[in-house]
Structures are given as C-alpha cells and as structure tokens.
C-alpha cells in the first residue's frame, strides 16, 4: 500500500519534471542543429560570395597584366627575344596560328632567326668541299684550311662562330687539343642569341667540348649564367644539352663562387625543362581548353576568359592585338601571382581569407565567376572568417540549457525531498494517532477494571485493595505522563514550551524520578540500580522537565529491555559537566536507527516494536528538554546488548 503510493509519487515526479526536461533538451538540441544547418548554409553562401569577390578582384588584376602585355607589342611582334619587358608574373606570351600556340623557341624559327647561315650557293659549295676533305678524305689539315679561308670571307657573327666550331673539330681530329680549345673558348663567349638552325646556341657546343677536353670551369658557368634570361627562347633540346653539361660539372664542381652560380643555373634549367614540357603539352591540349572560342567570333576583341592549366599551374587567357588582328595566348604563374597578392596589404585587409586555386573537379571548390573556367578556389584550413557566426550560438544554447536544467533539477530535488519528508511525517502522524489511542486505552481499561472490581465490593482483603488502588494510581500516572508528553510536544511545536529554571539538586530530581518508578518497576519485576554522587553542586534547571526526561528514559529502558530486568541509573560528574545515564541490557538499537530515534514520531520499524506501545515522542521531548538546558543527549547501543542514554548538562559552579 505504502510502496504503491511511493511508486505513484515517483511516477508523478517523472511526469512533471523529467519529461518536460527531456522535452526541453530535445527541443534545444533540435534548435541548435537547425541553427547550425542554417549557419552552415549561410557560411556556404558567404563562401560563394567571397569566391565571386575574389574572382572579380583577380580578374581586374589579371586583365591589367594582360593589358600591359598587349601594349608591349608594337606591331604584333615580340618586343624582345627574352620576356624581360613583361610583367614578372607572366610565364609566356605566344602568338596563335591556326588554333595552335607558337611556342617561344618556335617563334624564332618562324621569324627566320634560326636559318641555316650558309644558304648562299657559292658559300655552300666551298663548305661542302671542306666537309668532303674532313669526313671523306680525312685530310684534316686541308679541311681546316678550307674552313679558314671561308672564315676570312665571312662577316656575320653566326657564320664566323660556326666556322670556329668546324675548325676546332678538325683540330681535335688531328689531336691539336690546345689549339682547338682556343677556338672553343672564343665561341663560348658568344651570347645565347647566337643559335644554329636547330635553335641551339653555339656557345653550348663549345661548352660541351670544353667539358670533355679539360673539364669546364668558371668560364662555362659564367656563360650559362649570363644566358639564363634567354632560356625561354631556347629549344627543349638546347636546354637538355645544358642540363647534361651542368650535371657533368656537378660531379667535380669548380671553385665556391661559381658553385653557387652552377647550382642556380641547374635549378633554372630544370625548372625550364618542366616549363617547356608543360608548354609542349599545352600546345597539344590548346584546342580542348575552350579558349579558342573567340576564333569563331573575330569581332570579339576582348576575351576575358581565364583557364587553369598544368601541374605547376598557369592561368591562361587570350588577347588580340587589334593593329594586326592577331590572337595571342598569355600564361601567368599562379604561384608567383598569389605570392604577390598575399603580400598586398590592401588586398589582405579586404579579403582576409586564405585560399588556393584548384582544378574544377575538386568537390570542395567554389566558382570564381563566369570568366574563370576549369578553376575553383578552396579556402584554407583556418576558415574562422566564415565560422564565427554559428560558433557562438550552440555554446549559448547549451549554456542556457544547462542552466535551466540545473535549476529545474535542483528545484525538483528540493521539492522531492520536501515531499518525502511530508509523506514521512504524514505516515508518522497517522501512526501516532493509533499509538496514542492504544496507549490511552491500556491504562484506561485497567483503571476501569480495577475501579469496577472495587465498586462491587468484592475485595475483602485489605492488602489486595491497596494493591488495586496502587495500580489505579500508577496507571493514571502513566496516563498523565503520556498526556504531558503530548501536550509538551504540542507546546514545543507552537514554540510555547516554557522552562522555569531554578537552582535545583540533580540528586533530588533523581530521587523523585526513582520514587515515581518504584511501583511500575516492582510490578514488572525490574531492578533499578542507582549510582549517584551526592556532593554535586546544584544546577540551574527546570526540575520538572529534567525529571520528565529521566522518567521517559527509564520507561523506555523498561519497555525495550526484552528479557533483561536490570536497569542502571547513574549520576556522575566530570569536570564542568554532569552526566545522567540510563543503561539497559535490552533489545538495543541498530546504528542506522540511532540517527533517527530523536526525531518526533519516529519508532524503530521492527516486529518487536509493533507490539510495544509508544508514540515516538518520548526521546524527541528528552532531546528538546536537554538542549533547552544547553546540554546534549547521546546514545550508545548495539542490537541485542542494550543501550546507554546519556544526558550531559553543563555545571555552573558558583
Ligand atoms: P516510543 O514512544 O516509541 O518509545 P521514543 O521517542 O521514546 O518513542 O523512542 C523512539 C524509538 O526509539 C522507540 O520506538 C524505540 O524503537 C527506540 N528506543 C527508545 N529507547 C530505547 C531503548 N532503551 N532500547 C531500545 N530501543 C529504544
């Protein structure tokens, strides 16, 4: 029955507190998730928008570079053989012929710069004579002489140096290495613009020979170093040749100064090889890149499409030199371009976002706008720029949720505790009513029974009559004590219990209590052992209240003594305190129950106790009385062995 009610209470508690809390958690989590989704969407929108903004800014810059490049052309020709007059970010500018970009080294050939120098039939036949002596007859001296005569008649640098190389070749064949070296060194001094019909600088042939004859040194390094600005215009085979010579030189490098240059040249040459290979690939892929659309619409002079291409990526676009109506392809190094961009303070403050260009196949990339094809951008790891907005919200919601839940749970705990107390108190009260009725009934029944017997005048024996009368008096005393307890308790509850403190002798109080207990003890065969210190100073106390407390303890001793019939009452002193102890050897109290027995209405819930009449008020009253005297009430007890209740009162000696 009682358990059922508790279950109901718990259920009610769950329904009223836990369920709404769970609902609240669910709603908050959902809200946070929705908020997050929304914020995510907003962040994605922002990313799109910023990608467009970046696109616009880039386009402006790229178009500017393109414009500068276009202006560098005067009549549709390259401004110079090298690209030094272009913007530093520019990798290449190539004219386009028939849907095909003409690569920088091919342009030279186009312009006839790499034509065979001995076109003239007169010269050609004499050269052939020399070659016949050299290669067929193996008459190297004669061949040398023929080449030499030709040299004397030649004016152009290219012809002269070509002949030097031939003469040196014949000298080597006739084992005149020293003399050959002189010629090779002459050719080595020629700048890289002096190239043969294959676009290979003559200096390179000389360098290779020098390397073979005596190991190339500082001169070769310096020649290569000063040739670096011309690398773009050299054919791939020329650059391969350079790599070969440089690699051979690396085996035993020359002195330190040149070693740095050597290293630098090698890096540049390797870089150039990658570039040229990428250019060759581009030439093949060009028609598939979608940049050629303007060819169909010749009128469309301003083509603003930019395309990403290559492993070391280039941004590429086309433009038309209006004076000659010739299309050109321009390539800009993404790396260089972005480096410059990142150093630009105004740009960095406008768009504080870390980004990279990626191929359009990248799923995480964002479009830069209609003018960029095959390019997307991805933002760097640190996307704080977009995240701020939604990072605050979940934390805020969670905090609020924790706070609300905390308060709710704490409040419900307090409520639950209160409720439990109320329920316990209500239980105890109802038990109290039945206990009091029971306690009243027993003495009343015996009083009535004895009184009626006496009224019938059946008792002839005087001794028996006295005994009957004693019982009636004792029972009515028991009634009085019970009612006193109840009345006192109600006064205490109302805060109206008044103590009348006076000088009193504890010894006398104990005497009086013992006197009151003589009859009940005798009747039930109890033996009371009193042990007192007579010479105790008086205390300042309410004698009646203290006596009531002692009587309550003695009665309890009697009620809960089980088989034992011995009770001790001790009055002793220790320094500034007096102790009144009531010791029984009865049923005892478990440690767990010892904490509760001083509470009002509390009765140890055991089968033994059910049979013993009681209200659960006795000890609560004792405690109140003792505390009103600034004393302390303690219990020492173990089940089955008995209990010792001790009242400690302060002693005020005058
Ligand atoms: P009651 O009217 O039930 O005796 P009390 O307040 O005097 O009320 O005591 C509270 C409870 O403490 C008792 O119900 C009993 O279980 C336990 N108790 C009190 N005194 C003793 C004792 N001397 N020995 C064993 N149990 C005791």
Image (spheres, helix red, strand yellow):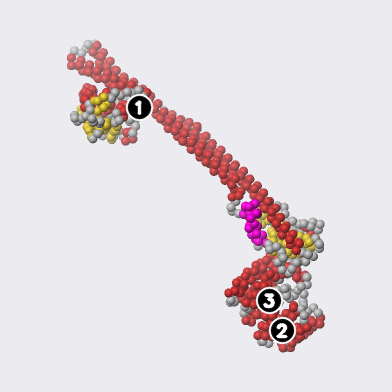
Give the residue displayed 60% in from the left and 49% down from the top.
385
**Residue 39 percent location from the top left of the image:** 61, 44
Residue 204: which numbered mark, if any? 3
Q: Distance between the residues labelled 1 and 2?
A: 132 Å
The quadrant in which residue 235 appears is: bottom right
Residue under circle 1?
Answer: 601
Which of pointers 1 and 3 lies earlier in the amino acid sequence? 3
Q: How far apart are marks 1 and 3 (CA)?
A: 116 Å
The quadrant in which residue 204 appears is: bottom right
Give the residue displayed 69% in from the left and 82% down from the top.
183
Which span is picked out in magenta?
A: 333-355
Binning the other alpha carbons within 10 Å of mark 2 as few (below 14), some (14 to 19) or many (20 upward) gives: many
Q: How far apart are marks 2 and 3 (CA)?
A: 16 Å
Q: What element carries label 3?
A: helix
Which of pointers 2 and 3 lies earlier in the amino acid sequence? 2
Residue 176: which numbered mark, if any? none
Point out the image quarter for the N terminus: top left
Would you say 326 lies left or right of 347 here? Answer: right
The quadrant in which residue 446 appears is: top left
Binning the other alpha carbons within 10 Å of mark 1 as few (below 14), some (14 to 19) or many (20 upward) gives: many
Q: What element carries label 2?
A: helix
Q: What element carries label 1?
A: loop
In this view of the protein, can residue 587 be seen by the observer?
no
Residue under circle 2?
Answer: 167
Give the residue displayed 33% in from the left and 31% down from the top.
597
**Residue 420 percent location from the top left of the image:** 42, 31
Q: Which residue ends up furthest to the front in the rendered image?
A: 654
Give the residue displayed 68% in from the left and 51% down from the top.
53
């Amino acid at each position: 029955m009682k358990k059922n009610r508790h279950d109901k209470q718990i259920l009610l508690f769950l329904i009223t507190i836990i369920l709404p809390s769970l609902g609240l958690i669910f709603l908050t989590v959902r809200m946070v998730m929705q908020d997050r989704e929304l914020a995510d969407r907003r962040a994605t929108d922002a990313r799109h928008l910023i990608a467009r903004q970046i696109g616009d800014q880039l386009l402006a810059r790229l178009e500017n570079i393109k414009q500068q490049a276009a202006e560098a052309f005067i009549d549709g020709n390259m401004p110079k053989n090298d690209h030094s007059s272009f913007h530093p970010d520019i990798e290449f500018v190539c004219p386009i012929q028939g849907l095909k970009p003409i690569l920088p080294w091919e342009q030279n050939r186009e312009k006839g710069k790499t034509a065979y120098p001995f076109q003239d039939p007169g010269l050609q036949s004499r050269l052939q004579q020399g070659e016949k002596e050299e290669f067929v007859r193996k008459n190297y001296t004669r061949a040398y002489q023929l080449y030499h005569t030709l040299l004397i008649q030649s004016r152009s640098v290219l012809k002269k140096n070509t002949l030097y190389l031939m003469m040196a070749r014949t000298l080597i064949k006739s084992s005149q290495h020293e003399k050959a070296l002189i010629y090779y060194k002459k050719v080595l001094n020629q700048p890289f613009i002096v190239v043969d019909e294959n676009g290979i600088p003559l200096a390179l042939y000389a360098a290779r020979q020098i390397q073979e004859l005596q190991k190339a040194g500082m001169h070769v390094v310096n020649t290569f170093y000063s040739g670096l600005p011309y690398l773009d215009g050299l054919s791939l085979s020329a650059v391969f040749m350079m790599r070969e010579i440089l690699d051979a030189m690396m085996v035993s490098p020359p002195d330190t100064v040149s070693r740095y240059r050597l290293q630098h040249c090698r890096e540049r040459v390797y870089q150039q090889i990658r570039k040229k290979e990428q250019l060759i690939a581009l030439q093949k892929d060009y028609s598939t890149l979608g940049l050629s659309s303007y060819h169909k619409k010749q009128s469309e002079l301003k083509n603003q499409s930019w395309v990403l291409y290559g492993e070391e990526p280039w941004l590429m676009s086309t433009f038309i030199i209006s004076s000659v109506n010739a299309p050109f392809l321009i390539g800009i190094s993404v790396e260089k371009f972005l480096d410059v961009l990142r150093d630009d303070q105004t740009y960095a403050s406008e768009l504080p976002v870390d980004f990279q260009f990626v191929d359009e196949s990248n799923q995480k990339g964002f479009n830069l706008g209609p003018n960029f094809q095959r390019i997307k951008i991805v933002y760097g790891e640190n996307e704080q720029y977009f995240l701020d907005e939604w990072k605050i919200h979940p934390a805020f919601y969670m905090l609020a949720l924790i706070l609300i839940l905390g308060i709710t749970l704490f409040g419900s705990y307090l409520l639950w505790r209160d409720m439990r107390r109320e329920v316990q108190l209500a239980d105890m009260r109802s038990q109290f009513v039945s206990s009091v009725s029971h306690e009243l009934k027993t003495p009343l029944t015996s009083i009535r029974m004895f009184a009626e017997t006496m009224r019938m005048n059946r008792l002839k024996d005087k001794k028996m009559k006295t005994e009957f009368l004693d019982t009636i008096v004792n029972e009515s005393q028991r009634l009085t004590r019970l009612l006193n307890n109840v009345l006192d308790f109600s006064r205490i509850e109302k805060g109206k219990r008044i103590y009348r403190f006076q000088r009193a002798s504890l010894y006398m109080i104990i005497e009086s209590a013992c006197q009151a207990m003589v009859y009940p003890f005798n009747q039930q065969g109890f033996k009371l052992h009193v042990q007192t210190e007579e010479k105790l100073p008086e205390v300042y106390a309410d004698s009646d209240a203290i006596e009531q407390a002692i009587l309550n303890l003695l009665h309890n001793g009697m009620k809960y003594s089980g088989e034992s019939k011995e009770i001790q009452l001790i009055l002793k002193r220790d320094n500034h305190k007096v102790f009144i102890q009531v010791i029984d050897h009865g049923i005892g109290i478990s440690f767990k129950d010892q904490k509760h027995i001083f509470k009002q209405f509390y009765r140890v819930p055991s089968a033994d106790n059910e049979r013993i009449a009681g209200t659960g008020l006795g000890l609560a009253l004792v405690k109140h009385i003792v505390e009103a005297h600034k004393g302390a009430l303690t219990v020492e007890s173990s089940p089955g062995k008995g209990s010792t209740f001790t009242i400690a009162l302060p002693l005020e000696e005058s």
